[in-house]
Amino acid sequence: MVSSYFKRLLLDLGISEERIEMLEGKGGIVEDEFEGIKYLRFKDSAGNLRRGTVVFDHHNIILGFPHIKRVVQLEKGIKRVFKMKPFYVEEKIDGYNIRVAQIEGRVFAFTRGGFICPFTTERIEDFVNMEFFKDYPNLVLCGEMAGPESPYLVEGPPHIKEDIQFFLFDIQEKKTGKSISVKDRIKMAEEYGIPSVEVFGMYNISKIDELRQLIEELSTQRREGIVMKSPDMKKIIKYVTPYANINDIRIGARVFFELPHGYFMQRIKRLAFYLAEEKIRDADFERYATALGKALLEPFVESIWDVGGGEEIAEMFTVRVKHIETAYKMVSHFERLGLKIHIEDIEETSNEYWKITFKRVYPEATREIRELWNGHAF
Ligand code: ATP
């Protein structure tokens, strides 16, 4: 149930009573609490309050991070979106999206879905200069948390060797969700020493060959892709490397039955468009075809063997926390997300950190494989 305080607030924001009731009825808005602070989380969008919006009070409204459109035909995509105009190209780094904001003197990190992440909230001060929020309490830092020690992803970008890091890619205003310009963001990040995604520079369609070259390099370096942004942040598109498409399939195939078939189909589609646009033929084509086949089949077959041998499908995650309680808070957080996680190991590494190893188990995928392996007809 949503309290009368939040109902009043939503009415003040111009959302009608019927709409509020409808949202509440289908679970589109949920009241949550984190360490005694109550907030409203939007699982659906409502008016200009995007999915993932978090509401504390009339002023502290953090809009959901917007969807970024994807192009699969690089050249025509760029022409269609940017015409002849210049745009910034920056790295699309593979991690999890986080919005960081100060509420009543405390800084919180919100996930894409609008949850306060206990792990990221604890660690964020290791990466972001908190002075920023003293000077700009009205701004929200949006960035990616990426690295090998992530609570949400099994793999990080290969160039991040340990732990996890924050990479800023957007600064938005509270309440409006309006982004500041790329130039101002870069300037502010420099001023406060906030780590940011790599900006490869300004491009326009006449530099398409250089951009293709950049994508080849990123793919060879096993990096995810690029995000292209107009200087005023009004137009944004993303493009992913062939490496990332195949690698996502490899990671997903291990838990094949947990993912919608679309997960695999979308990535095969993106790869096919890349092969067509780049006119990849002969030996190079064979290489991609083999890589795709292996990515899909190898981990899948291995997981069948594992289950056949009595094991359970599972993934392991290691993270560093400052307080053991944060690890337990993460377990509760995962439970609320409907995930089955348990702590496997707690190790004191230094005065500063504890290393926690979590195991995420996939009972449904395990059951499905076991039944099929045991000869069930369907
Ligand atoms: P959506 O399509 O709704 O944006 P998604 O999860 O399907 O989300 P992704 O392929 O993950 O799409 O790409 C979008 C995400 O990429 C962003 O939400 C952000 O977390 C991440 N990202 C990484 N680097 C950047 C960057 N430089 N600029 C913007 N987003 C970035």
Image: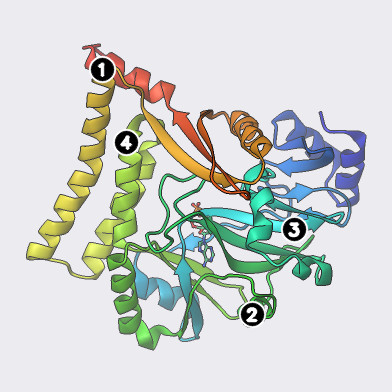
At label 4, counting other C-alpha atoms closer than 10 Å, the crowd grade (few under 14, some 14-19, many 20 or more) is many
Question: In this orientation, which residue lies closer to the viewer: 112 or 133?
Answer: 133
Q: Position of residue 12 (x, y in %)?
A: 91, 50
Which residue, given by chain and number where applicable, does mark 3 sit on?
101
Query: Mark 2 and mark 1: span between their CA atoms?
Result: 55 Å
Picture coordinates of residue 353, whole percent (x, y): 60, 47
Ligand 1 closer than 8 Å to label 1 CB: no
Whether residue 71 is visible to the viewer of this picture, yes or no, is: no
Which residue is under mark 1?
A: 372
Between circles 2 and 1, the one closer to the viewer is 2
* Amino acid type, mark 2: Glu
Tell me which label, 2 or 1, sits earlier in the chain.
2
- Kind of element beneath mark 2: helix
Residue at 21 percent of width and 12 percent of height: 375
Q: Earlier in the sequence, mark 3 or mark 4?
A: 3
Report whether 54 appears left or right of 200.
Answer: right
Query: Does the residue at mark 3 contact the one at mark 1 (Cβ under 8 Å)?
Result: no
Disc 1 from disc 4: Cα separation:
16 Å
Discs 2/3, front: 2
Look at label 3 and name its amino acid: Ala
Q: Name the residue carrying label 4.
A: 254
Label 3 CB less than 8 angstroms from ligand 1: no
Label annotation for residue 190: 2
* Distance from mark 2 CB to nearest ligand 1 atom below 8 Å: no
- Local secondary structure at mark 3: strand
Q: Earlier in the sequence, mark 2 or mark 3?
A: 3
Mark positioned earlier in the residue sequence (1 or 4): 4
Q: Earlier in the sequence, mark 2 or mark 4?
A: 2
